[in-house]
Image (spheres, grey):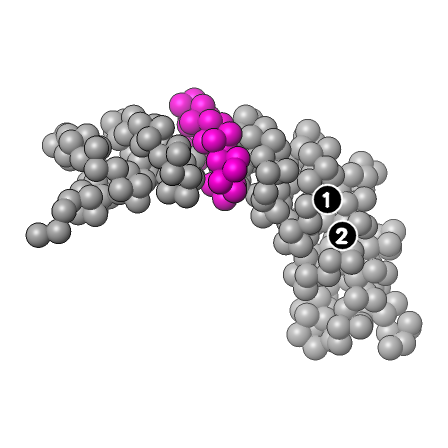
Amino acid sequence: MRIAEVEAIVDDLGGADHLRRVRCAQRLREEASAEVVEAVIERGLADGRANAQAEAARLAGDVGHGASARALRALVMDGRRAVRVRKAAASALGLLGDLEGIEALEAALGHPDAMFRRAVVEAAGRIGGSRALGLLRSGLGAGVWQVRMEAAVGLGGMPVEVAGEAIEGLMGAVEVEGHDETAEQMLRSLAELGVRAEGHRGAVEVALRGHLEPVARWRASMAAARGLGELGAVGSMEALRGALRRDPPLPVAEQVVWALGRLSPPG
């Protein structure tokens, strides 16, 4: 491997021509040796140009370059760096599943840029585990729905040992959620947790049943109906029948019928 070759690639990644950067990164992924890719990532992350750092961070996440995690954490926490660099570094930490990156992500959660905060929360959800729980619960209270949505997705994958805390956060958040698609995801995540965490299934069933009603939030109602079916919530069959009698929107009716079919005894 020639140093000059690596320098030339990093120059392309750091240049102003967006199309050239994309093509260069694509060639690296498809054609370059692992040795060259590793050298480009290390050199690119240390480069002073925002474009080179952002492209190197994306590359590190895509190829699973775990050795770059420490440098990526530093970029996430460095307030002097361009937001696009910090966002790419946060996303890479998520793809790497870097548990030690949770601290860096927590430090970045208060940033004013909403899409950076979304990337931070999405990364924490990808990393998962109990260490991500606090960050994700904080994300449920964000001022923009995209961040709340990613927090809900991440909480749905929490391990069973912290399922109760994840469920508690989601149950409180969905009651005040004004964005229907985000409320839908919160209920989907509740159902996902309820299926895995048997000890919390009853509380999740009650929460889902409470969201069968609002016609104005038909996506949430649809998720509630499906979740009851996935939970095997036989005790909610009458509530499902009642929802069907109220002539809900077709997508809700379809999920109610599906849930009733799943809960009904064979024959």
Q: Is residue 224 above or below residue 45?
A: above
Mark 2: few, some, or many residues within 10 Å (few <14, many ≥20)?
Answer: many
Quadrant containing the N terminus in the rendered view:
bottom right
Task: Looking at the picture, tell me which residue is in the foreground, 25 or 170.
Answer: 170
Quadrant housing residue 63: bottom right
Which residue bears the numbered disc 2? 69
Quote the CA–CA distance across marks 2 and 1.
9 Å
At x 61% / y 47%, what residue is drawn? 127
Number of numbered discs visible in the structure rendering: 2
Disc 2 and disc 1 in contact, CB within 8 angstroms: yes
Specify which label sits upstream in the sequence, 2 or 1.
Answer: 2
At x 80% / y 36%, what residue is drawn? 79
Is residue 179 highlighted in magenta?
yes
- Residue 30 horizontal/vertical position (percent): 66, 74
- Kindly state the secondary structure of the residue where label 1 is placed: helix
State the residue lying farthest toward the left.
267
Numbered disc in front, either 2 or 1: 1
- Residue 55 horizontal/vertical position (percent): 73, 57
Q: Which mark is residue 100?
A: 1
Any part of residue 132 in sight:
yes
At x 83% / y 66%, what residue is drawn? 39
- Residue 189 horizontal/vertical position (percent): 43, 39
Range of residues picked out in magenta: 156-183
Quadrant housing residue 120: top right
- Kindly state the secondary structure of the residue where label 2 is placed: helix
Any part of residue 220 in sight:
no
Amino acid at the residue labelled 2: Ala
Task: Looking at the picture, tell me which residue is in the foreground, 82 or 44.
Answer: 44
At x 63% / y 38%, what residue is drawn? 131
